[in-house]
Image: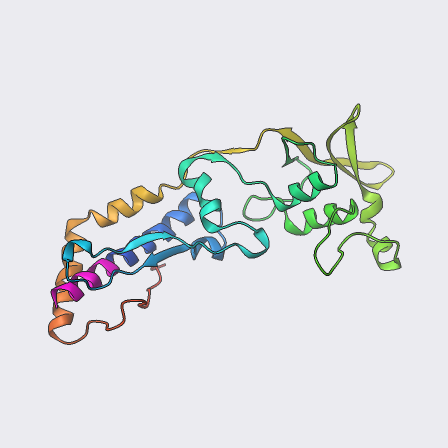
């Protein structure tokens, strides 16, 4: 009974840490998306004979981000430890096409459409890549063509690379004779993130809250005595943070 009660108490504590992390994300990040808020993973504690070996782990999911092409841990690492940001898929395409020089990265200008999360708008970067004809995905081609539909959009004529001498320095957009603006610049060195999401400090603060841990242990003991402890410690429902 003691083993199961301790495992259950630790799992409750881990889930409480997860809730606090979600609140911290909303404070640290500007309008975090759903996949960011749901990226925290709990590896539940399981009953063991040796009580000192029982542990619950709070970490981040190790799957990839779908179209983003990176793992959650890769995305979070710069936020937690501070480092250069990851190379974007759009930058890889521009480099492969010989447009973006090695060692340079795309950065927005005052004329770049941005999304609610503070990043370059996804539909806009799609138009740029299509217009420059650098999109090559397996089984499909999203580049601008000579079709009537594509010509009507005008992306192929609108976007072009600007250079200083022979060196590409950015991408401009022209939608009329007197409407030309630089929408992306190529800068040296990857943009650097400072440490901003104190993941470990948050988890440590919850784990070292003796009063909260004691309350979880007392509840687990009560549940054990009344036959309410879970029998499957692989998964347990995770409550959502109060709003």
Q: Give the residue furthest to the bottom.
A: 227
User: Which residue is found at the position 65% from the left and 42% from the top?
Assistant: 92
Along the horizontal axis of the image, is 159 left or right of 15? right
Q: Give the residue furthest to the front.
A: 49
Viewer-closest of 240 and 104:
104
Viewer-closest of 145 and 30:
145
- Name the colouring of the figure: rainbow
Along the horizontal axis of the image, is 152 left or right of 112? right
Along the horizontal axis of the image, is 51 left or right of 141? left
| Residue 99 locus on image (x, y percent) | 74, 36
Residue 213 quadrant: bottom left
Residue 87, compared with residue 140, is above or below; it is: above
Q: Quadrant of the C terminus?
A: bottom left
User: Which residue is found at the position 24% from the left and 73% from the top?
Assistant: 231
Main secondary structure of the magenta stretch = helix
User: Which residue is found at the position 57% from the left and 51% from the top?
Assistant: 69
User: Which residue is found at the position 40% from the left and 40% from the top?
Assistant: 80
What residue span does the magenta drawing correspond to? 1-12
| Residue 51 locus on image (x, y percent) | 15, 57
| Residue 67 locus on image (x, y percent) | 59, 55
Viewer-closest of 31 and 131:
131
Number of numbered discs on residues:
0
Residue 154, compared with residue 104, is above or below; it is: below
Residue 68, compared with residue 160, is above or below; it is: below
Instruction: Based on the picture, tell me whether residue 10 belongs to the magenta stretch.
Output: yes
Residue 85, compared with residue 122, is above or below; it is: above
Instruction: Based on the picture, tell me whether residue 107 belongs to the magenta stretch.
Output: no
Q: Quadrant of the N terminus?
A: bottom left
| Residue 150 locus on image (x, y percent) | 83, 55
């Amino acid at each position: 009974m003691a083993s199961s009660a301790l495992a259950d108490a630790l799992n409750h504590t881990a889930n409480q840490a997860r809730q606090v992390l979600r609140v911290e994300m909303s404070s640290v990040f500007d309008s975090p998306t759903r996949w960011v808020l749901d990226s925290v993973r709990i590896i539940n504690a399981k009953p063991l004979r040796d009580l000192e070996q029982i542990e619950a782990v709070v970490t981040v999911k190790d799957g990839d981000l779908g179209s983003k092409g990176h793992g959650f841990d890769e995305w979070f690492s710069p936020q937690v430890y501070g480092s250069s940001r990851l190379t974007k898929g759009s930058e890889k395409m521009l480099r492969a096409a010989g447009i973006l020089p090695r060692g340079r990265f795309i950065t927005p200008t005052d004329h770049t459409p941005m999304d609610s999360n503070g990043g370059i708008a996804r539909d806009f970067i799609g138009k740029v890549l299509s217009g420059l004809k650098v999109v090559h995905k397996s089984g499909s081609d999203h580049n601008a063509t000579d079709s009537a539909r594509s010509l009507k959009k005008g992306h192929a004529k609108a976007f072009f690379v600007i250079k200083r001498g022979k060196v590409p320095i950015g991408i401009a957009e022209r939608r009329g004779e007197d409407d030309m603006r630089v929408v992306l610049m190529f800068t040296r060195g990857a943009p650097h993130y400072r440490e901003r999401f104190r993941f470990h400090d948050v988890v440590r603060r919850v784990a070292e809250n003796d009063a909260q841990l004691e309350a979880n242990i007392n509840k687990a003991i009560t549940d054990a005595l009344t036959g309410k402890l879970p029998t499957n410690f692989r998964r347990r429902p995770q409550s959502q943070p109060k709003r």
